[in-house]
Image: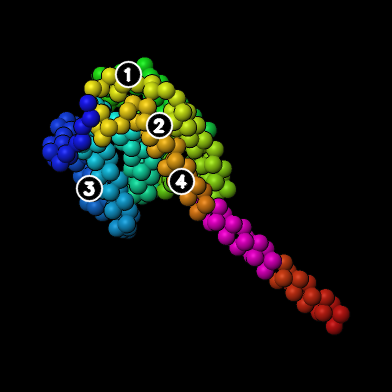
Amino acid sequence: MEANLDLHFWLTQWNPAPSIYIGIALLIALYLYAVGPLRKKYQLADSVKRSQVVLFVVGMLVMFLALASPLDELGDEYLFSAHMVQHLLITLVAPPLLLLGTPGWLLRPLLRKRFLLGIGKVLTHPFVAFFLFNLNFWLWHAPPLYNLTLSNENVHIFEHLLFIVTAVIYWWPILSLSQELPRLSLGGQVLYLFLSGMPSVALGAGLTFMQPLYSPYIQQPIRAWGLSPATDQQLGGLIMWIPVNIIVIFIVSVLFIRWMQAQDEKQRLQEVQMDEEEALEEVEDNIEIG
């Protein structure tokens, strides 16, 4: 049976779970308190950039829309492709915004503790970050686990929490603002992103060409916008495949340009230094001759 989801669906099918509303509001409130009164009280920093506050709040709003808006209901009940949009929002959009909005000085009091710093160094190591995120992402898209998340809300919540945590860890080597747990060099960032985007692209490509895998969508009698399970899964695979590729290529391109500029600047400084040394040697030779 075909169904077009009308305006009533988009206005009424918001996730009523209090944990989402309370959690998002609490995190924003704690962040604003930390970068405001707490920063001033303990003199953690002279000021906070307004752009960082905006990025953090926008990141939390993206998280809220992904988890509480009708997109959640659409992905849980009707469309695999909608669920993939939700997963991309909580792994590729919100976490980078949250990291860019978190000043390094805000984490410094926690990272002064050797135990926490040690754990942080292990988790944000590029190999570990790459492995944790991609293994977690692949496992939850295995049909038995995926189907379980759609039938058990507690498992579904746990899945989303793991997505968010591992995504923050995944983006850390690229976007960290912490001196204690710094980001990779520009060259390292380019290589890391180039390699780390491949597993998600491979999973998306595989889902695009496979037969429908997920029984809740196959058995759903209502076909939203007339999409068959096969077409829906193909669209979901493409959403996972193409946007990830575009995002990775864009960021890699920006990083590569910055890396090339840094190399040019380094070479220019070396040439200036060599010219100065040659000029100094020439002056010394003239003095000796004189």
User: Is disc 2 placed on a helix, strand or loop?
Assistant: helix
* Nearer mark to the viewer, of 2 and 4: 2
- What residue do we see at 38% from left, 23% from top? 212
> What numbered label is drawn on residue 215?
1
Q: Earlier in the sequence, mark 4 or mark 1?
A: 1
Q: Which residue is mark 4?
A: 246
Circle 2 crowding by C-alpha within 10 Å: few under 14, some 14–19, many from 20: many
Q: Which residues are magenta?
A: 255-272
Identity, as a three-letter code, of the amino acid under mark 2 = Gln
How far apart in space, not on screen, are marks 2 and 4 (Cα)?
18 Å
Q: Are marks 2 and 3 in contact (CB under 8 Å)?
A: no
Q: Residue 264: say if magenta.
A: yes
Q: CA distance from mark 2 to mark 1?
A: 15 Å
For mark 4, give the secondary structure. Answer: helix
Which residue lies at the image location 42% right of the left edge and 42% below the top edge? 243
Residue 234's label in the rendered image is 2
**For this view, does 12 lie left or right of residue 191?**
left
Is 218 in the magenta? no
Q: Nearer the viewer, residue 191 or 113?
A: 191
Residue 154 appears anywhere in the view: no
Q: Amino acid at mark 3?
A: Tyr
The structure residue drawn at horizontal position 18% and vertical position 33%, both measured from the top left corner, is 15
Return the mark for residue 33.
Answer: 3
**Could you tell me residue 131's position as x and y percent?**
49, 29
